[in-house]
Image (cartoon, rainbow, N blue to C red):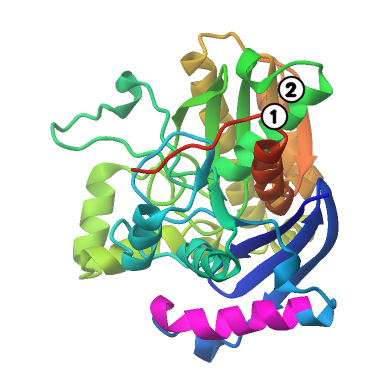
Amino acid sequence: MKKILVLNLGSTSSKVALFENYNMLFEDVLRHEIEKTNLPLIEQIEFRLDSIKESLNKHNISLQAMDAIACRGGVLKPIEGGTYLINNILYHDLKSFKYGIHASNLSGIIGYELAQALHINAYIVDPVVVDELTPEARITGIKGIERKSIFHALNQKSVAKQYAEETGRKYEDINVIVAHLGGGISVGAHKKGRVIDVNDGLLGEGPMSPERAGSIPNDELIKWVIDHQLNSKEANNMLSRNSGLISYFGTNNCLKIEEMMEKGDKTAKLVLDAMCYQISKSIGACAVSLEGNIDQIIITGGLSYSKYITNKVNKYVSWLQNVTIYKGEKEMHALNVGVMDLFYGKISTKSYE
């Protein structure tokens, strides 16, 4: 029996779980004080590590009992999907934040440092920078600017694999469209085990989301940035954190917006319907990427709990193919599976160089 410690650190919390083989023994969501999470990320390592150790102590779990550590992948150079051993190169790329500053980097940093002390291995699985785009999908209308693959790779690939398993097939043998609907939204075309096209789920492509702007008319966006006298960092922050539903209603809580709609707020209904419409258009675009050869459309993420949203999207896209809904996200399980499959020889470790 293998014991796997799973670490998934976010901007305001740290998720910790312990698995024995494929079974979860416990999961804790550790909420941190805003004063601490406002510190530079490199200064958060100590208190985050302490909180992880406290969680394990609470459950009477010894770190020495671990066989491996599975970590949420951070912002790295573009790599193909899979499970990667955290080596010195990967560790230093995470710790230097050379490819981007995000709290998810702390998962691999802390996991690697713990693993070194315990003389075991730490791994990352399907980080947000998974890049399997086709050459055609990268091209834009400006030479020197290419489309980026930044999306919810961990959960997207996890539910696609789950669907394949439930239908008696392998992920590498199916074509599916996966729409991850959360604070950010990404819609990917999965062809035979590779995500050949997907919108940049962070900064400015695809549908609007509860927190993000999505695609905006170029001329209006340029004018808006100039009128508001924003520098690039401020504009990025606005587009990725304070746009979408937040821009219209001051909240990213879809339940509240649905309640407003049910009480007769016409703007709430219009904007929510527009978001569903844009999600559906992105699914249609992925159908083109797959040349119409689609085994299933999958909806997942936090917003998949909303019957209004899923029914609305289903109405637009069900003529393309049937829709399966996997509610919420299964990132902790996906991280564990990515490492357990190594122990059972189902997959091979990939090398970060």
The part of the chain drawn in magenta is 41-56
In front here: 225 or 185?
185
Q: Main secondary structure of the magenta part?
A: helix
Q: Residues within 10 Å of mark 1 (few under 14, many from 20)?
A: some
Q: Give x and y (percent) for residue 182.
A: 62, 52
Q: Amino acid at mark 2?
A: Ala
| Direction from residue 235 to residue 338 in the image, left or right | right
| Residue at position x 51%, y 53% in the image | 73
Q: Amino acid at mark 1?
A: Lys
| Direction from residue 145 to residue 52 in the image, left or right | right
Asked if the residues shown at circle 2 and circle 1 are in contact, with their CB atoms under 8 angstroms apart, the answer is: yes
Q: Give x and y (percent) for residue 343.
A: 69, 40
Q: Which mark is residue 161?
A: 1
Quadrant in which the C terminus is drawn:
top left
Q: Is residue 250 visible?
A: yes
| Direction from residue 259 to residue 194 in the image, left or right | left
Q: Which mark is residue 7?
A: none
| Residue at position x 69%, y 77% in the image | 30
User: In the rendered image of this protein, does residue 166 appear above or below residue 219?
Assistant: above
- Farthest left residue? 143
| Residue at position x 80%, y 73% in the image | 61
Number of marks: 2
Residue at the spot of label 2: 164
Q: Secondary structure at mark 1?
A: helix
In front here: 299 or 209?
299
Q: Residues within 10 Å of mark 2 (few under 14, many from 20)?
A: many
